[in-house]
Amino acid sequence: MREKINVITLGCSKNLVDSEHLMAQLDEAGYEIVTDSNSTDAKIVVINTCGFIGDAKEEAIQTILECAEAKAEGRIERLFVMGCLSERYADELREEIPEVDDYFGARSLKEVVEALDAEYIPELETDRLLTTPDHYAYLKIGEGCNWHCAYCAIPLIRGNHRSVPMEKIIEEAEGLVAVGVKEIIVIAQDTTYYGKDLYGERKLAELLRRICAIEGVEWVRLHYAYPTDFPQDVIEVLRDEPKMCKYLDIPLQHIADNQLAAMRRRITKEQTEELVARLRREIPDIALRTTMLVGFPGESEEDFEELCEFVERVRFDRLGAFAYSEEEGTPSALTLADDVPDEVKEARVERLMKIQKRVSLALNAERVGKKMRVIVDSREGDFWIARSQYDSPEVDEEILVTSSAPLAPGDMITVEITDCEEYDLYAKHCI
């Protein structure tokens, strides 16, 4: 029998990709891999942590403490921690939670493999052991970030932007398609910066075209696109490539000029408005997903009202709002007072999401009666759970489909929207 390793992944989809690469190496070494299981009898546990914001750090520390207790009780024999939290706080963690056998940073895959008495095999660098459903996968095209926004710890954790060579990305994408992946979700801290460090110019548009050219790919989805200096050729790919989902995750964070300047976003309100208008002009059916950060130091009531007006007027298809939390070592933590009370931050998040709830319901109502192509994700009770090209897994809304025909996850079908809620659509299978 193969020895089991429980790999627990916390945080974002970029962390998930790191874990999947690790698991491919360990699987080749002869281990049996289980993921995020609380009931497993695995005696070895690896926790891949997130350290981006306060809530993520608390979740990571709590998970480490629970596993350390299990080790003290003899239920776990070996415990390792990797990822963003241990990249920043390894020394403090070693002192506070010594039950962990070792801590590794966010870029220490080889060291983790070797700590588990396995040989790291470079030829497996593009291999993955998927934890997502078989029909979609995330494809990470870069590490780190060059923008150095005032509130963000990513450059401190992951360093400056480093693109993955294009040939390696294509090899990995082809490997994913070979095992049944139909939807590829392209991710990085900033996807638009891809290629600048390797090729002297941004190459995201070329990369997306090459991914779309892979036989067997049905959808290609783009996440985490920084708005400043947004490349025109990427807009053209989103517009012209049939396999590109008419969808863009573009975190704007705010709209008030003084807030954008304080955040070091290197973009103005006017430029933001022009970019949104250009995207919608050139790709009329595009779904725009964004995030907003409220309660940043110095955010006045006037700033927040300006943001609310913008969100109500622009009507983003998908929007998330987050309260600012001070991250040590970042420019805002070093130079600005965290002067917006927590209760004000939370009230602003709540108000912004109430606006978005109204917007989302109105946009969904406009889809009732229309037909669209969807991909089936799973079955829940009486419904098949599906998504259109306008929805990314886990973060966006779902389409609850009834069908008299047999279906399976990964099927791509046409449905007619019959009803809606704020964040869900109901549909019938068009047979």
Image: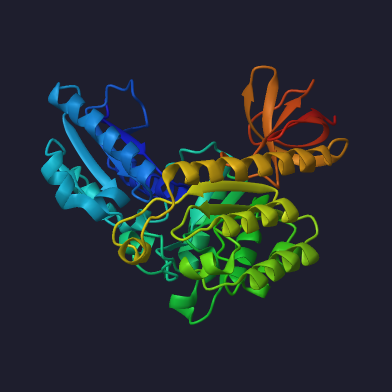
Q: Residue at x 39, y 64 (%)?
A: 144
Where does residue 236 sit, x and y in percent of width and height?
72, 69
Instruction: Pinpoint residue 399: horizontal percent, then vertical percent.
Output: 71, 33
**Residue ID at (76%, 62%):** 280
Spot occupied by residue 302 in the image (x, y as percentages of width and height): 60, 58
Q: Nearer the viewer, residue 20 or 365?
A: 365
Q: Is residue 225 above or below residue 22?
A: below
Q: Quadrant of residue 56?
A: top left
In the rendered image, the residue lying farthest to the right is 369
Q: Is residue 77 above or below residue 82?
A: above
Q: Quadrant of the N terminus?
A: top left
Q: Position of residue 57 (x, y in %)?
A: 32, 43
Quadrant of res 412: top right
Please say whether residue 99 is visible from this viewpoint: yes
Q: Which residue is nearer to you in this view: 150 or 378?
A: 150
Please say whether residue 179 is visible from this viewpoint: no
> Is 15 left or right of 294, judged from the image as shown?
left
In the rendered structure, the answer to whether residue 180 lies left or right of residue 373 reads left
Quadrant (top left, top right, bottom left, bottom right) of the C terminus:
top right
